[in-house]
Image: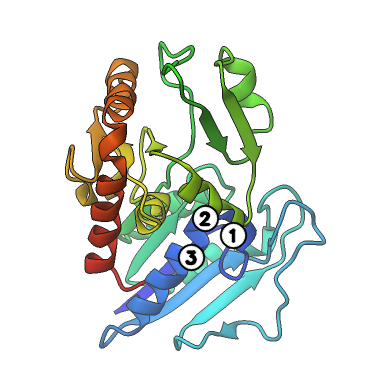
Amino acid sequence: MKLLHIIPTFYPATYWGGPMYSVYGLCNATAKISGATLRVLTTDAAGPSRSDAVEMTDFPMLYPGGYEVFFCRRWWAHSVSPSMILRLWPMIRWADVVHLTAVYSPPTIPTLLICRLLGKPVAWSPRGALQRWEGATSIDVLGKTLTLVGSDHGRLRDSTMPMQNERWTGRLSPEALRDEYQRADVFVLPSRLDGFGLVVAEAMATGTPVIVSSAVGAKDLVRDGENGWVVESDSVVALKDAMESAYRARDRLVEMGIRARETVVNNYTW
């Protein structure tokens, strides 16, 4: 079976966060499947500037996992690459199955259209993003600090009412992110849609219980009230109730964090 993975950026472009690690691990595991031939089509974007580029020694590059990665030159914005768009048709035609990662990226619509025209099955991993929930203004939990991690560019911050004891970190390195996991009493990922949510597993691996929405794939790791909480997606009330429950159960959070770590260690190897 011939498999094509289309993603706007790819490892080692770790500037873009968790999906770079999870997709890289997924591709390495997929390449080991007997009878599978994998190719990855992506751009060389390694950061926000055009000068931030993956160093290419060959085209395509043969990765240690035994699959080819086609790094197309990014010309502007996050991942706009005319050469990548031009390669979509022949590479999708080559594939038996297409795996598309990301939503808000230039290759998404052309990939879906070409797959439709050629009758190719497509697995679409949208990946979660922090968005404002309808009806949300602010959520205050007495006595706690809400730390928001990630690049916002002012959009979310401008659309919400500031919360008392609110702290924004911006984008963090993997080491700094690990420190934030460990500093937190509880990790919260209230995504509207998230195929998995690697950050959930990362937080649990550091011994931090989690609160996730029902739209997060990693909710399957969470045993409600034991190593975290699962709340109804898009429900501000449910999210607030879970955060307040975590605050009331703060004398149990260390024990819950130990269970969270055990869950990840017992279920995952990469």
- Amino acid type, label 1: Glu
Contact, mark 2 vs mark 1 (Cβ under 8 Å): yes
Q: How far apart are marks 2 and 1 (CA)?
A: 5 Å
Q: Distance between the residues labelled 1 and 3?
A: 14 Å
**Residue at horizontal 53 percent and vertical 63 percent from the top:** 88
Indicate left or right for 36 with 80 as reference.
left
Which one is in front in this view, the residue at disc 1 or the one at disc 3? 1
Crowd rating for badge 3 (residues with CA inside 10 Å; few <14, some 14–19, many 20+)? some
- Amino acid type, label 2: Arg
Indicate left or right for 179 with 225 as reference.
right
**Residue at horizontal 64 percent and vertical 18 percent from the top:** 158
Which of 114 and 51 lies nearest the eye of the viewer? 51
Residue at numbered disc 1 = 175
In the displayed structure, 221 sits above or below 29; it is: above
Contact, mark 2 vs mark 3 (Cβ under 8 Å): no
Quarter of image, res 133:
top left
Q: Distance between the residues labelled 2 and 3?
A: 14 Å
Where does residue 218 sit, x and y in percent of width and height? 28, 49
Residue at numbered disc 2 = 178
**Residue at horizontal 64 percent and vertical 46 percent from the top:** 171
In the displayed structure, 100 sits above or below 192; it is: below
Query: Secondary structure beneath disc 3?
Result: helix
